[in-house]
Structures are given as structure tokens and as C-alpha cells.
Image (cartoon, rainbow, N blue to C red):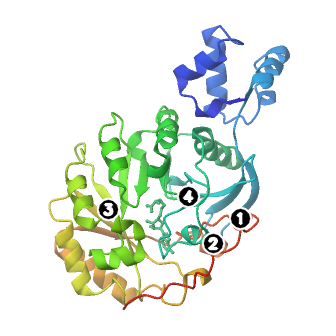
Amino acid sequence: MTDLLGLPRESLAEALAPVVDRPFRVEQIYQALYARAVPDFAGMTELSKDLRARLAERFHIGHPAISERRLAADDTCKYLFRLPDGATIEAVDIPDRGRRTFCISSQAGCALACKFCVTGYWGAGRDLTAGEIVGQVLAIRADRGLPMEGLNVVFMGMGEPLLNLPNVKAALDVLTEWISPQRITVSTVGLLPGIEEMAGWERRPNLAISLHAPDDARRSELMPVNRTWPLADLLAVLRRFPLERGRKITFEYILIDRFNDAPADADRLVRALAGLRAKVNLIPINPDTVLGGRMVPPDDARIDAFKERLRAKGLIATVRRRRGDDVSAACGQLRAFGRDPRGFRGKKEPPALSR
Ligand code: SAH
């Protein structure tokens, strides 16, 4: 059965053609799917019973099933979704005064094994379909009673979006009919072929790069992918990445106590990013038992000193606030713990760091 949520407006009309021929009916269905986030055809009461039955025979609306939801004291809400094949993924709704950001997943796991990341610790999972990506946004909206307006979406949940680029692109084609690409951010470890492909897109979302270290030695230690796509190559490709006026590339930099948080590291970071339209988002690492005892954040004074050092040298730098802490919704803690564990990665011990 075809999932209607993976289809942008025109493809939706084509898919519906055998059942619905009048354009205004197609428009009613489109509005019901997105403006109202209706999860099933039964909810489309503006359509005849007969039409709803015929639609249900051929199509489905891929809202992932909410298997668990946890509302944090700060109103952040973490969702565990169960997909039809049993795969589980997480997404987070992060309200912030007038704004609101959904952090969504692109894969049901991750193969890249970054040492600071809980999802990576649990290992690879399958690619999500375009419908499953869009479905996360709609399922959260339906649950929280939210309109599409005013939403920001970040691909910073589980998985590496650029390893699932065709489906991420298809999902963006749908989402950008409702949300400006300027309000959508795709975060990547820095896979060059994917970044180069995105550079050619007409409607580009914001790009965020998980940098996390100022040199290859430490970046390779944290992120094995750096051995394939080292810093110099990554930064060269980013220097060519087309940016509209006023837009910048975000660099995410996890701060790990006494590992990458020295003043000299701030200086190296400034040099590495020279010539780029960059902003740096500093993320004090969220510790987790599976990550080992070295993966702890610096104290506030060190965090602040690092930020100020970047600023003094002219970089835009912010520190990411912790949200949803009490429900393990904070950065890097998405691990779909509701799934049947396939076991931890073999013999892996919590990572030892070199310094
Ligand atoms: N694979 C993509 C998308 C996942 S988002 C990427 O790596 O960019 C991954 C982001 O989650 C990282 O950039 C980091 O900002 C955050 N993250 C992962 N583990 C974390 C941890 N233990 N503490 C804080 N942030 C973490």
C-alpha cells in the first residue's frame, strides 16, 4: 500500500488519480493530511463514506505509532515510535518560547559509531522511508495539537541523513511545501558526496556539520568517519557550498572535559573555520552510562571561556541549552531503548580517550 505522506502535492494527485479525479477532492485530502495532520481516512469526514473506504483499500497514512511518550518538566516531549516492521525510532518536540523545534530521525540506528553518541553505540539500523520521516512531524503535531506554522525541523535525531539522502530529499520536498527550507536543518558528520549533492539542490535546507574536534587526530578518535573524509577535504567542500545571503553553516562542537576544550583548541577551531560563513554551536556533552566516564562536560567556567575565546576572535558562538534532561531526551541520548536489544556492540568497552 502506498504511503501518502511520502508524496509531494503533484505526485499525490497522480497517485490518487485512480480513485479521486476531481482536483478539489485531491486538495481536500492534501489539506487533511498536512494542515490537519489527520492520521487515517476515517478522520476525513468531508469525504463520502464510500470514498474513504476506497482510499483505505489502496493507501495508508504513515503516522508512526507512538509506543512511548515522555513529557519533561521543561515541556520537551520525547517520542518513541514503533514502525510497522518493529523498528523503533525517537524524535523530540522542543518548545522554546514562541518557537518550536522538532528533532527527527532519518535512520533507525546509525552505522557511524561516533564515540560520544548513544545511537552510534547501539549500531546500524535501516533507512527510514520518506513517509516515515514526514510521518514523525505529523504524528507529533497530531499528538500535541499543533499547526504546521511556526515549526522548525532539525535532522539531528537518530541516523546519518546523508546516508539516506534520496529519502531525506523526498521528505524535504514534502516538508518544504509547508515549512520554509530556512527553518529546516540537516545535520551531518560530513559525508562529502552527500554535501556536494545537496549543493546542487534548488531549495537547500540549512546545513549543520558535526565537527567536534579542531584537528584530524582527535576528530578521527571521536568520529571514525573522519578517516575517510578528513577535515581539510571537508572544509574545502564547505567553502564552496552555496549559501544565500545571510545564511551560515552551523558547526556543532561537543565539549568534552579536558579533551577538546582547551583555549588552544578554541584557537585551532577559529583557524580551521577561517574564511567560512560559520556559526559554532557548543554542546556540553551529555554523559551516558554506555559512553564511559571520560565523556563528561567541562564545568561552566571552562565552557564559557571556550565560547568567549571564539567570540573574541570574531566567530559567532552559542552554547546549546540542555532540554528534556529528565526524560533522556537531551542531545545524543536517542537510542530507541524500547526496542528488543540486539545486544550491545560485541566486545566494545566504553571508549578510552587518548588525553
Ligand atoms: N548523524 C548526524 C545527525 C545526528 S545529530 C550528525 O552527526 O550530525 C548528531 C548530533 O547529536 C551531534 O552533532 C551532536 O550535536 C549531538 N550529540 C550526539 N551525542 C551527543 C552527546 N552524548 N552529548 C551531546 N550531544 C550529542
Q: Earlier in the sequence, mark 1 or mark 4?
A: 1
Residue labelled 3 has its Cβ within 8 Å of some atom of ligand 1: no
Residue 254 visible to the viewer? yes
Q: Distance from label 1 to label 4 (Cα)?
A: 14 Å
For the residues carrying marks 1 and 4, which lies nearer the camera in this image?
1
Q: Residues within 10 Å of mark 4 (few under 14, many from 20)?
A: some
Residue type at tag 1: Arg
Q: Distance from label 2 to label 1 (Cα)?
A: 9 Å
| Tag 2 secondary structure | loop
Q: Quadrant of residue 11?
A: top right
For the residues carrying marks 2 and 1, which lies nearer the camera in this image?
2
Q: Which residue position is annotated with label 4?
A: 95
Q: Which mark is residue 70?
A: 1
Q: Which residue position is annotated with label 2?
A: 328
Q: Earlier in the sequence, mark 4 or mark 3?
A: 4
Image quarter where the C terminus lies is: bottom left
For the residues carrying marks 4 and 2, which lies nearer the camera in this image?
2
Q: Quadrant of residue 71?
A: bottom right
Q: Position of residue 343 (x, y in %)?
A: 70, 72
Q: Which mark is residue 229?
A: 3
| Residue 57 vertical position relative to residue 128 in the rendered view, above or below | above
Q: Residues within 10 Å of mark 2 (few under 14, many from 20)?
A: some
Q: Position of residue 286 (x, y in %)?
A: 52, 78
Residue type at tag 3: Trp
Residue labelled 4 has its Cβ within 8 Å of some atom of ligand 1: no
Residue type at tag 2: Ser
Q: Distance from label 3 to label 2 (Cα)?
A: 31 Å
